[in-house]
Image (cartoon, coloured by chain):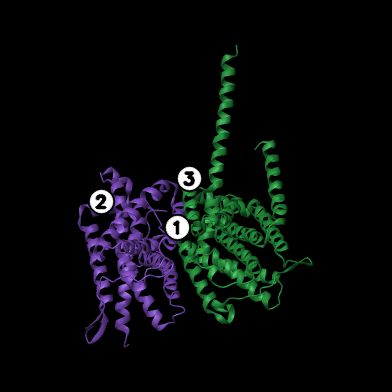
Chain colours: A purple, B green
Amino acid sequence: MSNLLDLLVAGLATGAIYALVAVGFMLLWQTSQTINFAQGEFVMLPAFLMLAVMHAGAPFWLAIILGILLSLLLLGLGFKLLLVDPMLRHGVLPLAIATMALAIGMKEAVKQFFSAEASPFPSIVPAGDVSILGRVVSLQSLGVLALAIAVVIGLTALLNRTSVGHQMQATAQNPTVARIIGVPVERMILLTFLINAFLVALASLLITPIYLAKFSSGEILGQAAFIAAIVGGFNQVRGAIAGGLLIGVVDNLSAAYVSTQYRAAVPLILLIVIILFRPQGLLGRPEERTV
Amino acid sequence: MTATGKYLRIALGVVVIAALIIVPMNFNRYGLFILSQWAVMTIAAMGLNLTLGYAGQVSLAQGAFVGIGAYAAAIMTTQGLPLVAALGVAIVLCFAIGWILGYPALRVQHHYLAFVTLAFSTLAFLVFRNEDWLTKGIYGISNIPRPNVLGFATNRPLPFYYFCLGSLALVSLAMWWLIRSPWGRAFVALRENPVRALSLGIDTRRYTLMAFAIGSALGGVAGTLYAPLTQYIDPVPFNLSLSLDLLMMVIVGGSGFFFGPFLGAMIAVLLPEWLRFTQGYYLMLYAVAVMLLLIYSPTGILGSLDRYLAERRTKAASALRAVAKSRLETAP
């Protein structure tokens, strides 16, 4: 019991990052049927963009801003215009395969142009510990958790409280009707891609100080986000958030209490159980649109 | 299809087969290794093509089935058992696992088989890595013997390449027969119009399951060839990326086309080798090539070829019609 609180906080912190990535993943699926197998690499790249800016001599805060802007440009606009738009009308699968190829390309490009070794990355949350209820908890975990929660609340507010958010939801639920009632569907889809790019850049900023910047670090992350989205429910933002938090906690607890060798298996078994007994996910509604 | 077209096809087939037999005779060890790998991957991709192209289900575990076959072959042949026995075990094991995985997943249709197989793929990798008593874990199994086929030893690269090519030919013939059998026709019916297939009395769920299980078993067959090919296996090659690679092969070649996996495996196995002269850039260029190919022809190479030929045929037919019509009009 002694370190249960630590494990929970650390698990929630990683889980919150998974949730950010899973929400982006799910938004792309909802608005444009894009299964992005490169989502993990999308999280890996912004850290390297920021490192590249810092190597050029810029301070950390400027690197963060430029890194996020570059992500919006490359992973949001570029991804949509160059890969998704030409392929979307040919169905889900060719595009999914193309994103797999994109993942390979991104990994290799980082390995070739940057480094095959893991690089340290500065943390935006100062290192140190604080004590809560007499227990020592790492400040970094708390900071990550707080920031991720703030972003998730902001995003939920954007989707549920603003006109733009309602238009995005309409686009996701029924693009044809949305177009008829005057929603600028194309612009809304572009907006989801930009939001996804912003979310992955933020996730990159939060997770890279913990796991170091490495060209291959996206593989595990992408899979975790994918599982989180399915477990939580593929058609609900709050489902993806719950799934992300759950996977993060389960992952951390199973590393401590099950075995380090099979820690990765526990979320997968959870996934299979969910598919067997609640295929629409924990918080999802049964699919209305046939795929 | 006209008679000349048919002869043309047969002639093309004979030329390709002859080339596959004669050309590699002067290849070095590495070239033969790559070609053998192409044959093995084609078998695995053919299995996946049955699942994806004919039954319309996405499997992300074909690499895991290749791994199961490879470990069956490695464990059994290093214990002195013949490869044929390992082949039998691999087929039965992969078929049974495919059936067990597919049964619950297909209860809920859609993309759930993809999710279940994704999870299974990673679970299988963890078992390969962690169960030291069976798979020797990360140290892998070395000194895997190559089999004697009909009294011929296949230790040297060239005989082993012919062994792989022969296996590919046998699997292709079996597949050709399967697709033309009532089962195969039921598979095609499933893909073309599942509702109509169901109303015609085809038990769609059982046939989908069957297609997936047979496809998985072919993954196992590929695995039993893979182990003696490399003569050393460890868990790394059988992770999720092999499954994704195989899926890429099927789509790029043209899913649902008989020869799609042959072309797809050629691109996935040989293209990176041809690009090796660019050194560190070769996988990057390969990724870009695959993306461009998919943007240009999303139904795969054979899909585009098929469309092109169909268009040309319609054009030719309408030209003939126009000629006939003008003759009719000018006739007194």
Parent chain of label 3:
B
Q: Is label 1 in a helix, a strand or a loop?
A: helix
Left/right of residue B94 with respect to residue B19 in the rendered view: left
Q: CA distance from mark 2 to mark 3?
A: 32 Å
Helix, strand or loop at label 3? It is helix
Disc 3: which residue:
B296
Give the quadrant of residue A256.
bottom left
Relative side of A196 to B274, left or right: left
Q: Point out which mark residue A167 bears.
A: 2
Between A139 and B255, the residue placed more toward the observer is A139
Disc 2 residue type? Gln
Q: In which quadrant of the rendered image does the N terminus of chain B lie?
A: top right
Marks 2 and 3 in Cβ contact (< 8 Å): no
Instruction: Please tell me if label 3 and label 1 are on a single chain.
Output: no
Foreground: B56 or A33? A33
Residue A288 position, x and y percent, is: 37, 55
Horizontally, residue B207 falls left or right of residue A280, namely: right
Q: Chain of mark 1?
A: A
Residue A225 point in image, percent of width and height: 38, 66
**Mark 3 neighbour class, 10 Å CA radius: few under 14, some 14 to 19, many 20 or more:** some
Question: For the residues tagged 2 and 3, is the chain the same?
Answer: no
Tell me the number on the disc at residue A105. 1
Residue at 55 percent across and 65 percent down: it is B63
